[in-house]
Image (cartoon, rainbow, N blue to C red):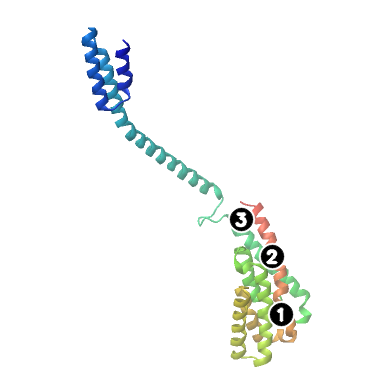
Amino acid sequence: MALLQQPVMLGIGCSNALARARRVQCLAAASHSHMPCLPVLLRVSGGGGGRRQGSRRFPSQKIGLSRRIRRKDLRVVVAEASAAAAGASPASSPGGVSVSDVLWPSAGAFLAMAVLGRMDQMMAYKGVSLTIAPLGAVCAVLFTAPGSPAAKKYNMFVAQIGCAAFGVLALSLFGPGWLARGAALSASIAFMTITGASHPPAASLPLLFIDGPKFHNLQLWYALFPGAAGCIILCLIQELVIYLKKNCKF
């Protein structure tokens, strides 16, 4: 009986050649002991064959199952990403921009012009104005692209002061005309490139000074007023706009 059990246990986990050798031993043992060996042979051959067939089928089944799981996981991830994107801006315009992202910068620009206009009324006796065209461009940069390099405080104030000073210098050297405009603008571009203070609205300040007789009496004070002084007010309003965009979304 022990002789019959040993081939069964070994034959199940062995290769084809070893299983055939165990079946031969089983037949020899059965012929000497006169005991039926058919159930043992069935278990040896059937069990080994079943395992071989199972080992042939299992990798393909495992690969197919893993592929189905991956496809299912991919569909779930895509569905979750789509839901997150759809829920990110529930109240949005057809272009994908929320109403608050449009309203607060527009309201900030209106408030900026209102404050600067009120200051113009208070300083009308001096004949100067804070509502100049370059500050309108500054509003667009600060309120619509607050994270851009042109909206950085260093870039803005360094460029505003430097470019305005070049306008005063060019007028004093060349007088009003195309030569002063060209010299002031080229010097302003070189200045912003060297200092790394890229702020495009500041490039219009020297042209405004050269062509605006009402600013000539300011001389070097023009480097601080109205450009740099107006930017201080716009920066304060920008902080209010950023706060409202973050905390009052609709």
The kind of residue tagged 1 is Ala
**Is residue 140 visible in this depiction of the protein?**
no
Q: Please name which of the two marks, 2 or 1, marks the residue nearer to the observer.
A: 1
Q: Position of residue 137 (x, y in %)?
A: 62, 72
Asked which secondary structure carries label 1, the reply is: helix
Q: Position of residue 194 (x, y in %)?
A: 61, 77
Q: Which residue is tagged 1?
A: 223
Q: Residue at x 49, y 43 (%)?
A: 80
**Is residue 79 visible in this depiction of the protein?**
yes
Q: Which residue is tagged 3?
A: 100
Please identify the quarter of the rendering in which residue 6 is found.
top left
Q: Is 90 situated left or right of 130 in this image?
A: left
Circles 3 and 1: CB atoms closer than 8 Å? no
Q: Residue at x 75, y 81 (%)?
A: 221
Determine crowd level at label 3: few under 14, some 14-19, many 20+ residues with C-alpha closer than 10 A.
some
Q: Is residue 115 above or below residue 162?
A: above
Q: Which residue is tagged 2?
A: 111
Q: Residue at x 76, y 74 (%)?
A: 121
- Residue farthest toward the bottom in the current orientation of the protein: 174
Determine crowd level at label 1: few under 14, some 14-19, many 20+ residues with C-alpha closer than 10 A.
many
Q: Is residue 169 above or below residue 234?
A: below
Circles 3 and 2: CB atoms closer than 8 Å? no
Please identify the quarter of the rendering in which residue 151 is found.
bottom right
Q: Position of residue 190 (x, y in %)?
A: 60, 80
Q: Is residue 159 above or below residue 243?
A: below
Q: Earlier in the sequence, mark 2 or mark 1?
A: 2
159 or 236: nearer the viewer: 159
Give me the C-alpha separation between circle 3 and circle 1.
Answer: 36 Å
64 or 5: nearer the viewer: 5
The kind of residue tagged 3 is Ser
- Residue farthest toward the front in the current orientation of the protein: 32
